[in-house]
Image (cartoon, grey):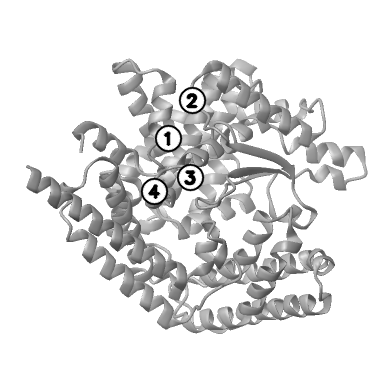
């Protein structure tokens, strides 16, 4: 047994060396991605974007996956097993997207989104010290023309929908750069140079939009990845053993169930539909204090209630700042948004941005209309702050595992936030009268996502039919429905992961709290301690003691 143990240790050490080599090379190849992780030495870089670069990364991922799969799974135990499984999943999904589906060849959004996000990310993360980050921003601005030109050369028969969305994204990028030009120029030691760099980047986005529009387009439903690939992602991203038809059947059942719950809850508010009850509550709502102060008060209250109820641990030193959205970002954020600290950043402080557009309005009526867009802000604060995304990232970014600090399985982090919303309503952390109605309505929306996700990617559901399902099922406008469906087309299995994730948490809760007598705090702390990975992997480590 000692010999076997020594051999296992050697396999684990080999795995660590393999994974570290992979990340080191990947960070050098894609420095903008490394920068987002908090590796600040890459802040001023954008990286290459030509065919050779993408092929080299595919070769690296293939070589790395082969090396890791050659290490016996049985040699890995506990956290080491979770790290190995998370890393294997990371490599497999990367290869599916880059080698098999060739998204860098058929999705023009990949290139323009990366370019504008490289600027947007730095501005958001360093919004309070623009002058200090300006040299890095200027360096990236200077690299954008070559980056986009190389990206255009990569494309081959792009999906028409994605081409249209990329062209709109380029228009948005030009608008965004125009909006931040004055802010950057005022902070610059050479304003004329800063303006030239912005002008050159704007022209590059315009040229890219024109170029991709002239390219021969691929199939109109080229976004559909097919049943086999979809089921592969169900296993690798969600950690679930489901066929596509089984997932769709579950979704249809959940739609019917949520519709019934919504009808029952709405009946408490008289002869109104759920939508009418929500709209009536929104009309009668106005915060007692200015919106920013309201968000601060709600966030502070939620944190205090978590301490009082003692249902989850709050890591020592975690902080969440509630701040007004900077003027140059106002038209790029929703009513509120959370910015998590990067996993490797020294400063682990989350930022909860409040976008109060009522401050820009002069008439009382228009001011009130903008304020009412924030109706339900308590649930928003639960989802984004405590005990939702912020708390989850505050714990994850403290993990010893560098691999799982980088893990981003939506079935975990979105399942967790939906679980948090349920806890908040059931334990009365939120005071909004129609909180449960809002929660069920959102769950219905997420149930429809499961059905649509399956239908779009096996080809049984058209784009227009998917939009209509959201318009009829949850009363979305055509524009909002289209925005959702656009995202679904390029993120297979992610849309379905929200509600499925919450259901997986509820199963574990019934087992460990209901069946084995764990406290709620013990349960919540346990699940958060693993990082954003599929729930089934967490359960396997517990059950098998591996």
* Mark 3 secondary-structure assignment: loop
Identify the residue position indicated by label 3 in the image.
Answer: 397
* Mark 1 secondary-structure assignment: helix
* Separation of marks 2 and 3 at Cα, in angstroms: 17 Å
* Separation of marks 4 and 1 at Cα, in angstroms: 12 Å
* Separation of marks 1 and 3 at Cα, in angstroms: 11 Å
* Separation of marks 2 and 4 at Cα, in angstroms: 21 Å
* Mark 4 secondary-structure assignment: helix
Specify few, some or many for label 2: CA neighbours under 10 Å numbering under 14, 14-19, or 20 or more. Answer: some
Q: Earlier in the sequence, mark 4 or mark 3?
A: 3
Which image quarter holds the N terminus?
A: top left
* Separation of marks 4 and 3 at Cα, in angstroms: 9 Å
Write the residue at 57% across / 16% down.
Answer: 308
Left or right relative to 371: residue 29: left
* Separation of marks 2 and 1 at Cα, in angstroms: 9 Å
Q: Earlier in the sequence, mark 4 or mark 1?
A: 4
Identify the residue position indicated by label 1 in the image.
Answer: 528
Quarter of the view holding residue 506: top left
Q: How many marks?
A: 4
Left or right relative to 69: residue 211: right
Q: Earlier in the sequence, mark 2 or mark 1?
A: 2
Specify few, some or many for label 3: CA neighbours under 10 Å numbering under 14, 14-19, or 20 or more. Answer: many
Residues under numbered marks 2 and 1 in contact, where contact means CB atoms less than 8 Å apart:
yes
Which image quarter holds the C terminus?
A: top left
* Camera sees residue 130: yes
In this orientation, which residue lies closer to the viewer: 71 or 158? Answer: 71
Q: Earlier in the sequence, mark 1 or mark 3?
A: 3
Q: Which mark is residue 404?
A: 4
Image coordinates for residue 443, horizontal then vertical, percent: 50, 34
In this orientation, which residue lies closer to the viewer: 501 or 133? Answer: 133
């Amino acid at each position: 047994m000692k010999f076997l143990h020594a051999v296992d240790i050697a396999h684990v050490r080999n795995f660590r060396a393999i994974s570290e080599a992979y990340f080191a090379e990947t960070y050098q190849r894609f420095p903008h991605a490394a920068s987002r992780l908090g590796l600040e030495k890459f802040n001023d870089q954008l990286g290459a974007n030509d065919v050779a670069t993408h092929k080299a990364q595919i070769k690296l991922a293939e070589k790395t996956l082969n090396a890791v799969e050659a290490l016996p799974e049985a040699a890995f135990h506990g956290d080491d097993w979770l790290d190995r499984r998370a890393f294997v999943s990371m490599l497999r999904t990367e290869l599916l997207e880059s080698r098999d589906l060739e998204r860098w060849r058929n999705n023009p959004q990949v290139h323009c989104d990366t370019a504008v996000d490289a600027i947007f990310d730095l501005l958001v993360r360093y919004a309070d010290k623009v002058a200090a980050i300006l040299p890095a921003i200027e360096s990236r601005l200077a690299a954008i023309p070559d980056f986009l030109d190389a990206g255009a050369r990569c494309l081959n028969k792009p999906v028409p929908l994605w081409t249209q969305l990329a062209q709109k994204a380029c228009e948005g990028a030009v608008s965004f750069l125009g909006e931040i030009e004055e802010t950057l120029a005022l902070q610059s030691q050479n304003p004329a140079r800063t303006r030239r760099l912005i002008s050159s980047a704007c022209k590059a986005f315009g040229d890219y939009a024109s170029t991709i529009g002239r390219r021969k387009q691929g199939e109109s439903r080229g976004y559909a990845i097919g049943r086999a690939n979809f089921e592969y992602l169900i296993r690798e991203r969600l950690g679930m053993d489901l066929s596509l038809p089984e997932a769709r059947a579950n979704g249809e059942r959940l739609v019917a169930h949520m519709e019934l719950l919504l009808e029952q809850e709405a009946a408490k508010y008289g002869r109104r539909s759920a939508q009418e009850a929500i709209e009536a509550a929104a009309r009668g709502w106005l915060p007692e204090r200015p919106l920013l102060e309201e968000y601060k008060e709600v966030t502070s209250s939620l944190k205090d209630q978590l301490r009082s109820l003692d249902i989850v641990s709050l890591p020592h030193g975690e902080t969440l700042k509630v701040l007004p959205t900077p003027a140059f970002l106002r038209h790029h954020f929703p009513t509120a948004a959370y910015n998590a600290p990067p996993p490797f950043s020294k400063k682990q402080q989350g930022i909860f941005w409040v976008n109060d557009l009522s401050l820009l309005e002069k008439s009382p009526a228009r001011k009130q209309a903008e304020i009412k867009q924030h109706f339900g802000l308590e649930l928003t604060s639960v989802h984004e702050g405590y005990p939702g995304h912020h708390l989850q990232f505050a714990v994850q970014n403290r993990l010893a595992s560098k691999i799982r600090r980088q893990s981003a399985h939506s079935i975990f982090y979105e399942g967790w936030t939906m679980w948090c919303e349920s806890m908040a309503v059931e334990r009365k952390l939120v005071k909004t009268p129609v909180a449960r109605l809002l929660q069920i309505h959102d769950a219905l929306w997420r149930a429809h996502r499961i059905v649509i996700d399956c239908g779009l990617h096996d080809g049984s559901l058209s784009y227009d039919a998917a939009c209509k399902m959201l318009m009829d099922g949850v009363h979305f406008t055509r524009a909002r429905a289209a925005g959702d469906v656009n995202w679904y087309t390029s993120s297979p299995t992610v849309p379905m992961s929200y509600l499925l994730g919450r259901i997986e948490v509820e199963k574990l809760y019934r087992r460990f709290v209901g069946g084995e007598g764990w406290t709620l705090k013990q349960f919540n702390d346990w699940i958060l301690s693993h990082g954003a990975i599929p729930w089934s992997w967490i359960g396997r480590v517990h059950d098998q003691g591996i």
